[in-house]
């Protein structure tokens, strides 16, 4: 689900190791055609699932350099690196566990009980199956991950609250990591002035 086409898969194969080296995970890759192709890459930090503007810029610079060498697309293209956003796609089995308790929409690659689309509260995972409490159903359904064509979180008050809590925690962690750097720079500046 991270990719849809062979071109997406080719980009992912190149981008994943670059992202991993920087501490990021690729969430999704889409190459969209047009007068000028657009390579859209959604990513998140491995540490906390967040992605700041600075993180996007860092990953974009590294991917641009790598794509210059690897040349995965024959024509001109625009590279877009972004966070998955609040109503993020769920493209990895672990995402369904991480976002347990939140509302999601799933689209399957086949009909199940006469339909392909399902909506409900994520209830985690069971082996290679997604557990979901479907709307208007009493029992938790288990859906094989391999049957998922697309899945995403749906915006609710609970999602907004959880997203804000994650962002606040990530901001605090970022501030802690920046404090020693700033102190080190201040010490270097003071030494240079003497």
Image (spheres, rainbow, N blue to C red):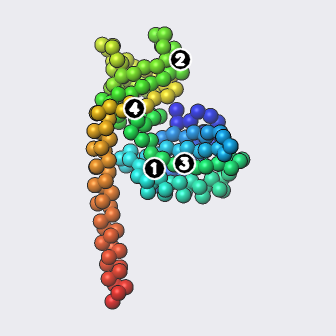
Tell me the residue that label 4 is attached to.
Answer: 153
Q: CA distance from mark 3 to mark 2?
A: 31 Å
Q: Residue furthest bottom?
A: 194
Question: Going from the N terminus, do you reach mark 1 or mark 3 first?
Answer: 1
Q: Dots 2 and 4: beta carbons under 8 Å? A: no
Q: CA distance from mark 4 to mark 3?
A: 21 Å
**Residue at position x 45%, y 35% in the image:** 89
Q: Dots 1 and 3: beta carbons under 8 Å? A: no
- Characterize the local packing of mark 3: few (<14), some (14-19) or many (20 or more) Cα atoms within 10 angstroms: some
**Residue at position x 45%, y 29% in the image:** 151
**Residue at position x 66%, y 40% in the image:** 34
Quick one: 147 or 76, which is closer to the camera? Answer: 76
Q: CA distance from mark 4 to mark 1?
A: 20 Å
**Residue at position x 50%, y 21% in the image:** 108
**Does residue 174 appear in this view?**
yes
Give residue 24's mark: 1
Question: Going from the N terminus, do you reach mark 1 or mark 2 first?
Answer: 1
Is 145 located above or below residue 191 in the figure?
A: above
Element at label 4: strand
Q: Residue furthest top?
A: 114
Give residue 173's mark: none
Q: CA distance from mark 1 to mark 3?
A: 15 Å
Question: Going from the N terminus, do you reach mark 4 or mark 1 first?
Answer: 1
Tell me the residue that label 2 is attached to.
Answer: 110
């Amino acid at each position: 689900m991270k990719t849809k086409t062979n071109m997406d898969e080719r980009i992912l194969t190149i981008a994943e190791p670059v992202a991993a080296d920087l501490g990021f995970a690729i969430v999704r890759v889409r190459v969209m055609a047009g007068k000028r192709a657009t390579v859209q890459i959604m990513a998140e930090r491995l540490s906390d699932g967040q992605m700041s503007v600075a993180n996007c810029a860092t990953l974009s610079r590294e991917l641009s350099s790598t794509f210059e060498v690897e040349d995965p697309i024959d024509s001109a293209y625009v590279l877009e690196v972004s966070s998955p956003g609040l109503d993020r796609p769920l493209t990895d089995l672990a995402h369904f566990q991480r976002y347990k308790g939140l509302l999601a929409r799933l689209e399957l690659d086949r009909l199940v009980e006469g339909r392909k689309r399902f909506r409900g509260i994520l209830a985690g995972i069971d082996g290679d199956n997604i557990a979901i409490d479907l709307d208007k159903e009493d029992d938790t359904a288990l859906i094989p991950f391999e049957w998922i064509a697309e899945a995403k979180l749906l915006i609710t008050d609970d999602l907004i609250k959880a997203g804000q809590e994650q962002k606040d925690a990530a901001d605090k962690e970022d501030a802690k990591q920046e404090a020693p750097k700033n102190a080190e720079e201040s010490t270097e500046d003071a030494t240079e002035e003497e």
